[in-house]
Image (cartoon, grey):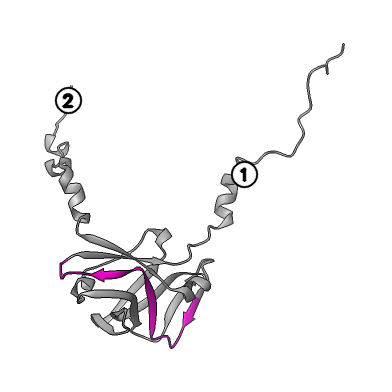
Amino acid sequence: MKAIKRYPNNYLSYPIMYQPHFWYTGDLNTEEITLKNNTLLKSEVSQIDLCIKSISAIDSEGQEHNIFKSPGETPVQIKSMSSGEFIRTRCLSKLAKGTYSTLRIYAANDTSKLVSNTRETKCVENKKYYDFEIKDTLVIKSNRDCEFKLWFELTPFQAKPSLIKPFLDLFKKTDRLVHRLAGVYGK
């Protein structure tokens, strides 16, 4: 009989994974911000493909504060909240104390792609920036180094009926009539 070699190091797990404080410490220093653009919601846009030139925040008095300036073109794909994707950034922690109502994203080149909820792509030209309203306004009280999650409220993609129809047909009631068998075989 052949001896089986066992390597116990393969079956060991890392002890840090069993410490509960390790699971939750990453999210203690993060804030979530929901951004909304009414014109994109009305036109049922689900995704924006653009190259970011800079990002600025507009405070409640209407003054624009530059947060992020890209040295080159940074391609970004902005998706709706329903996709579960967000942008993680630390650049908002550089803001001065105050309340901010709008986040403005400048596009590097004049063309950006808007994908509708039916997955139709439309190229938009000569759009320099996109203004997103901050839900419940962003209030910065102190200069602390924290991370921000930017969620974008856009229209979710429509599900393709061809993918769902076979699954729904399993639960559909059949239209044929089932005859009663009692009393069929003579009396």
The answer to which quarter of the image holds residue 131 is bottom left
Which residue occupies the extreme top position in the image?
A: 187
- Residue 26, image x and y in percent? 19, 55
Q: Residues within 10 Å of mark 2 (few under 14, many from 20)?
A: few
Give the prevailing secondary structure in the magenta stretch: strand
Mark 1 falls on what kind of element?
helix
Left or right of 94 on screen, residue 44: right
Residue at 55% across / 53% down in the picture? Answer: 163
Left or right of 60 on screen, residue 180: right
Q: In the rendered structure, which amino acid carries the disc numbered 2?
A: Lys
- Residue 179, image x and y in percent? 79, 27
Quarter of the picture containing the N terminus is top left
Residue at 54% across / 66% down in the picture? Answer: 118
Residue at 35% across / 82% down in the picture? Answer: 107
Check disc 2 and report the residue beneath it: 2
- Of residues 88 and 71, the one drawn nearer to the viewer in this rendering: 88
Q: Which is closer to the viewer, label 1 or label 2? A: 1
Q: In the rendered structure, which amino acid carries the disc numbered 1?
A: Asp
Which residue occupies the extreme right position in the image?
A: 187
- Of residues 104 and 71, the one drawn nearer to the viewer in this rendering: 104
Which contiguous range is marked in magenta?
A: 122-145
Residue 155 located within the stretch drawn in magenta: no
- Residue 23, image x and y in percent? 20, 47
Q: CA distance from mark 1 to mark 2?
A: 53 Å
Q: Earlier in the sequence, mark 1 or mark 2?
A: 2
The reply to whether callout 1 and callout 2 are in contact (CB within 8 Å) is no
Residue 114 - label: none
Above or below, 98 against 126 in this view is above
Check disc 1 and report the residue beneath it: 169
Quarter of the picture containing the C terminus is top right
Mark 2 falls on what kind of element?
loop
Residue 134 located within the stretch drawn in magenta: yes
